[in-house]
Image: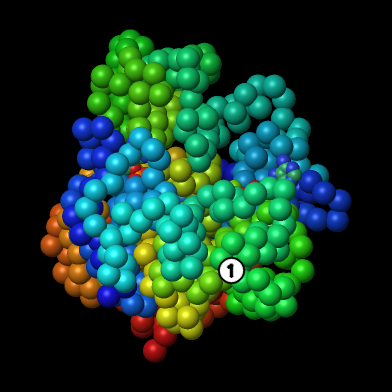
Amino acid sequence: MILAIEDLTVSHGEKKIVDKVSLTIDKGEWFALVGQSGSGKTMLSQAIGQLLGTNLRASGRIMYQGDNVLEYPKEKMNQLRGKAISYIFQDYHGSFTPFLTIQQHMEEYLQTHGVHQKTQRKEMMKEAMESVGLEASFAKRYSFQLSGGQLQRASIALALLLEPDILIADEATTALDSVSAHRILSLLQDLQQKKGCAILFITHDWRHVVRYSDKIAVMKDGKIIETGTKQKLVHQPEHAYTKQLIQAAPTLPMRIREVSKS
Amino acid sequence: MTVIEIHNLKKSYNPGKLAVNDVSLTIQKGESLGLVGESGCGKSTLARCLLGVEKMDDGSIVYNDAPIAHANRKQLRNYRRNVQTVFQNPTASLNPKLKIKDSLIDPYLQFKDDLQLKHFHFTSKQDFVQQLLETVELPKELADRYPHELSGGQKQRVTIARAISIEPNLIVLDEPTASLDVLSQGAILELLGSLQQTLGMSYLFISHDLAAVYQLCQRIAVMRDGELLDMFRKEDIYHTSRHDYTKELIDIF
Ligand SMILES: Nc1ncnc2c1ncn2[C@@H]1O[C@H](COP(=O)(O)OP(=O)(O)O)[C@@H](O)[C@H]1O
Ligand SMILES: Nc1ncnc2c1ncn2[C@@H]1O[C@H](COP(=O)(O)OP(=O)(O)O)[C@@H](O)[C@H]1O
Ligand SMILES: [Mg+2]
Ligand SMILES: [Mg+2]
């Protein structure tokens, strides 16, 4: 187990946006959190890295290496973020400052996390760009000079720079078309297998869930209503809402494809 | 019978690069044609040229056997009435200052002198609005609300109701579910399918999602980098003659 969320509640005044959620993420696994928009997925994921707005309050426990990181002081959490837990978001533009190049972002990131040797930083950056299939020259560009798919690759490179134990991907491909989304997700799968990090994969698209995840939790109105292995949830979903989510995502007919392949 | 023909359409925004490169296609009466491809491949440009909101560089569009380029005012008006649109973002498509009932009735008021509706029969404007809401499975109370009081899925139903209200021959649907929540996406696809059954109009359904296109359409056209690469009937999707790029798209789902 790499991360255990226990009775996590996120409240906005009296309103419970995340309501007593518990889940555990194992080392190196692809854990999908699925639900309609507004179900509380983002709030749950932001509570993990203390990224919630000041008007929201998180209670319960988020256990990482024996510590409840909800109780970490801000500075300690800042160190953990990036090194142990990192994020990529739907709004990949938001991961970059417009007046810094990709390279400058990486430089800064490595420096704040204690990589002081310039040659080492250079080597790490080069490797990171390569690993996400971006030409090294892209590092000299500003974020607005990259396409959506390229920018999300760059943000993955940044997020994986320090080999975190867990990567939180919050609707990371929702803003992309299905082809670019698929390329990004297969890239992420390759990197995950190479580096062994766990992924908390937040999405509303059941097709991505089916294709990539090991374990699935379905969230509705702030609660986890069903959780289990992919095998279990895909083939024997219990909750009507899970079935609804499966139904809503269009798919190509499977049987004919199998026939034409043989 | 053919509703519309596009011949050798070319459109470029920047010298040296064609956003739409020599694309020809036809849409039959009552059929739903899917246009699928990655973002930036030229789908929306093609749609905008078809709708006449973008000027094409070369090629022609033929409606009712007459090239649009040579159409007189009456023919153009007839074209505008018969080719309706539903876009990705319903919020941008609805006037925020108009009540839903006024948005709904607007195309009818615009074209009522030329209209002979076959499906909708009504006794008053209010009756018509109620029928339209019912057709897209929305509660009647929404008539007196403003767009901001509706969910994204409800707003998209309103723009669909508005598009069908004047019984066009063709509706151009440009990523109509892309900005919606998953459950609304599925529901809108189903609604579009059943409306076509009852009203019999044609669709040009544009999407990057091959599985969504497959669900709604009888024929599928595949674009890449401005070019039309592949065109096939739904049942031939797994046929060996499919373009390699189509196979790549298929493998995603
Ligand atoms: N900063 C905030 N303050 C108060 N309520 C919020 C805030 N952010 C989100 N919410 C509310 O919390 C609920 C869950 O939101 P979110 O976690 O973003 O859902 P999801 O990511 O599943 O779409 C929504 O009802 C949303 O309106
Ligand atoms: N108004 C415009 N001005 C300049 N370039 C444009 C404009 N609209 C689209 N393009 C470019 O034309 C190409 C096709 O775009 P578009 O038709 O929107 O593709 P799609 O709808 O398939 O995503 C893209 O390279 C896009 O950047
Ligand atoms: Mg979210
Ligand atoms: Mg488009």
Side (left or right) of B206 relative to A71? right
Coloring basis for residues = rainbow
Residue under label 1:
A114
Residue B120 location, quadrant: top left
Please give the chain letter of the residue carrying mark 1.
A
Side (left or right) of B30 relative to B22? left
Q: Is residue B74 above or below residue A48?
A: above
Front position in the image: B116 or B60: B60
Instruction: Spot the residue most to the left.
Output: A238
Q: Which residue is painted at 72% across and 48% down in the image?
A: A99
Front position in the image: A19 or B33: A19
Residue A237 location, quadrant: bottom left
Q: Position of residue B79 (x, y in %)?
A: 60, 31
Q: Position of residue A145 (x, y in %)?
A: 73, 54
Instruction: Spot the residue most to the right.
Output: B15
Q: Is residue B25 above or below residue A156?
A: above
Decide if ligand 3 comes within 8 Å of the CB at mark 1: no
Residue A68 location, quadrant: bottom left
Three-letter amino acid code at the position of disc 1: Gly
* Mark 1 residue element: loop
Q: Position of residue B30 (x, y in %)?
A: 45, 45
